[in-house]
Image (cartoon, rainbow, N blue to C red):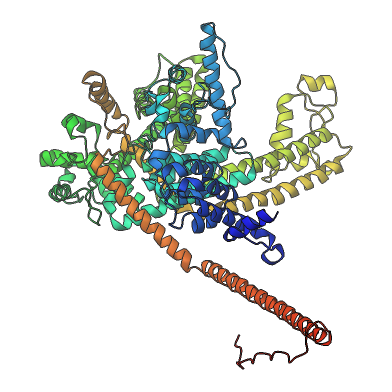
Amino acid sequence: MVDRALSIYKNRELVTVFNGEQEGSDDFDTVLLKALVKASKYVASNASEYTEELKLAVAWDRVDIAKTELFNGGIHWKYEDLEDSMTDALINNKPQFVRLFCENGLNILDYLTYGRLEGLYRSLSDSSVAYDLLQKHLSDRQGLAGSLHNLDGAKTEEGIPLKSPSAPNGHAPAMELNLYHVSRLLWDLLGDVCQPFYYGPLGLDYKISTRRALKHVNKMLVGDCSYRDQSCASPWAALFIWAVLQNYSEMAVYFWEMTGESVLSALGGCKMLRELSKLESETESKLAMKELAQKFEDLAHDVLGECYQNSESRSFTLLIKKSSVWGGATCLQMATAADARLFFSHDGVQSLLSQIWWGDMERSTEVWKLVLTFFLSPIIYTDLIKFREQEEDVKSVDVHHARDSDSLDGHDANAFSIADTTQNDEDVEDISPEKENLKDSLPSNSKRPFIVSRWRQFWFAPVTSFLGNVLMYFLFLFLFAYVLLVNFKPPPPDGPSPLEFVLYFWVFTLVCEEIRQTFFVGNAYVLQSMRNYIQDVWNKCDLTALGLFTLGLCCRMFHWSYEFGRAVMAIDFMVFTLRLIHIFAIHKQLGPKIIIVGKMMKDVFFFLFFLAVWLVAYGVANQALLYSYDPRPTWIFRRVFYRPYMHIFGQIPIHEMDADKLEEGNCTNDATLIEAGEEPCLNTFANWLVVILLVIYLLFTNIVLVNLLIAIFSYTFSKVQERSDTYWKFQRYNLIVEYHSRPCLAPPFIIISHLHLIIKRYIRRIPSVKSKHFVLELQDRKSSGLITWEAIHKENLLSAQKKRERESDSARLKRTSVKVDSVLKQMAEVRDHDRRLQLLEKELEYCCSALSWMTNALSQSDLIKAGHAPSAPQRSESKLTP
């Protein structure tokens, strides 16, 4: 025991005294961790000796101690020392430690390999939606692998969980989760906006089918998976996606700050979170996902605003640039998929859309000038419609391309040209494959004669195509109404009339256009193209209209179904007329109102549910009380459903309901005659009850339900009206994309454009340019320069936000609170020192009294000779200052 005490005394600088009553039980982990770090510093000579203390700090989430004790500059950390702790911090959601490690020696390029990324996905929480989706894809692959192995007579493993233990050599077993399952998960969330992720490391082609891809992955994973040792091509983006799938808010925001292509990454995170929130069943997790998704949309909006203030043309390029990290997606495509209405309401996006919408014409051109030019085409060669000067465009592009594309100032090195996005299919013949990049994408109009170039400037603008379709559609409706009301001839051989044949041909051109939109727009598969087409509400309306027209056309050709075919045609005219609503969505005043009407239509269904309950309840009771026996189904339907519905609008046949006002008529109570068709007599036994039920029914329906519907409509109107401009701008983008992709000719003349496209695509084999809407592919140097420019403005935005946070009242209160806590702690220490001094003074007084007693006792005893006691030392009088 003495030797142990002596050893402790020799190492007394390692002793740390903790008093729970004085320091508090909450500070025990701090004291313990500091003691361990102090001991390690005493015996250690390199950073590897501190790994256990670092892991303990990560486990206890004490980043403050790690900063002051382990990362204060006294220890030189290497990558190998931080590798395991970084993994623990990622899995356990410790974003502050992740930031600390990345700032103190950890190279993310060396750290994140594809194998370690797979390990991170295996650590997903069992309760997360992403875990369930990955487990589903893993089960599908295991099932296919089992069927393949069973064909070979081999045994397979079944039911391997997502978090099964890894092989001893550090690699995952062949049937464990891998990058292919992650790729399928991201495909489920992002759809066809992006090409499949991680197909490159797996050696898969982007156009390969799912079954063939599974077979290839199963064969590859049986052998040595060399891709797992490769560094991830875009580590920050990969970690950002992983954090978003985990719904780690703070960590996802940090990875977003570190990744490139900030606007597109934020929109991608917003899209994934909103898709996950639709699948999430827990309310708190769903709300957290929606809040984080909105936060990323706000970040994308703010970064674009910062970029737009610096350079308008560069911002345009940023919106339509293809991204290699996000599978060839653009910001506009991702924002559309994410339903980012706030992002589309930005002035930069709307300015780009307006520039594309008007083409080379001035945006201030009046609509009546365009309509007049439709009928008097030579007017385009006058000054009635203003066009952009081509000489200025060529000069501007030359100057921009003469500059260094990597310049990061306010100049537009990557200048945006409207010819990059409004180029029509007819331009493909004049463009060689070498001139499809931005540098050589000068407006081709400048190389043509003035007559041809001006003609193309007017007729190939999307606004011209839109107005042409509107005018021709009104003419189509007029022709349809005229044929239906005046010129609808009997079946052959007397009909149809020539005008009706013109109508049939017109509808045939509409069918051809719908086929082109379904199968010849975009690069998706046939089934995926059909799914994308069906998802649009107005495409469903088009299919309904064309289907009804086809049915009516077939029926009107025969005498036995002629009247039915005419009735179907009449209903079909209503559907075609309602299609006008979509056309007017481009109008700034009518567009928001159309959205409000659509929202109100959903509210009507809830109203109809309550109305149907009361209508059936009253209708059945009313029929049973008024008529003792009436088995006729048609009259039962009229009296149970139709008549109570008309009561709401005031059509009440009081002479058939009130016994005092009954009119004499031919009626009978004989069941046989009633079954033969005679009118049954009214039952007057409980007529007073019929009147009471009528009063209650009208009171509830006309007052309660109708006012409830009005209140619902008022709430919907006020709610949508607040954001009507945002809704309209988002809807405007979809309409501009649609008419940008359409041929310049409107039905029925659009058949000429269709024949032209068939000749070019399948005979002359000229590839399509307009199949890629609003897409610009930059060279590596220009793309990296644009990304750097975007990153600089993102840093400016983050710096401004942090500055505002520091200057905010809440931040000031927080800093004041910290200072007050520090002062209170120091005051507590001062009081503790005073208490200790008082205890020390009491002990000294006791010692003095004890010594005095001992002196007196010894002086009176015979043990020592008597003598004078030593004199006490003189105290120097001084004033003690606190």
Residues 365 and 788: in front is 788
Q: Position of residue 799 (x, y in %)?
A: 40, 60
Viewed as shown, does residue 396 lie left or right of 609?
left
Relative side of 381 to 822, left or right: left
Which quadrant is the C terminus positioned in?
Answer: bottom right
Q: Is residue 861 above or below residue 330?
A: below
For the N terminus, give its image quadrant: bottom right
Q: Is residue 344 above or below residue 72?
A: above
Which residue is the extreme one toward the right?
685
Q: Residue at the spot x=27%, y=22% of the render?
A: 758
What percent of the width, then of the height, locates residue 282?
64, 41
The residue positioned 29% from the left and 57% from the top of the image is 310
Return the residue nearer the eye: 455 or 771: 771
Residue 487 position, x and y percent, is: 40, 27
Q: In the image, is 520 to the left or to the right of 852?
A: left
Q: Residue furthest left?
A: 449
Vertical side of 115 occupied by 676: above or below: above
Viewer-nearest residue: 241 or 312: 241
Residue 391 sits above or below residue 779 on the image? below
Is residue 849 rendered to the left or right of residue 239?
right
Residue 539 sits in which quadrant? top left
Q: Is residue 525 visible?
A: yes
**Closest to the observer, 610 or 772:** 772
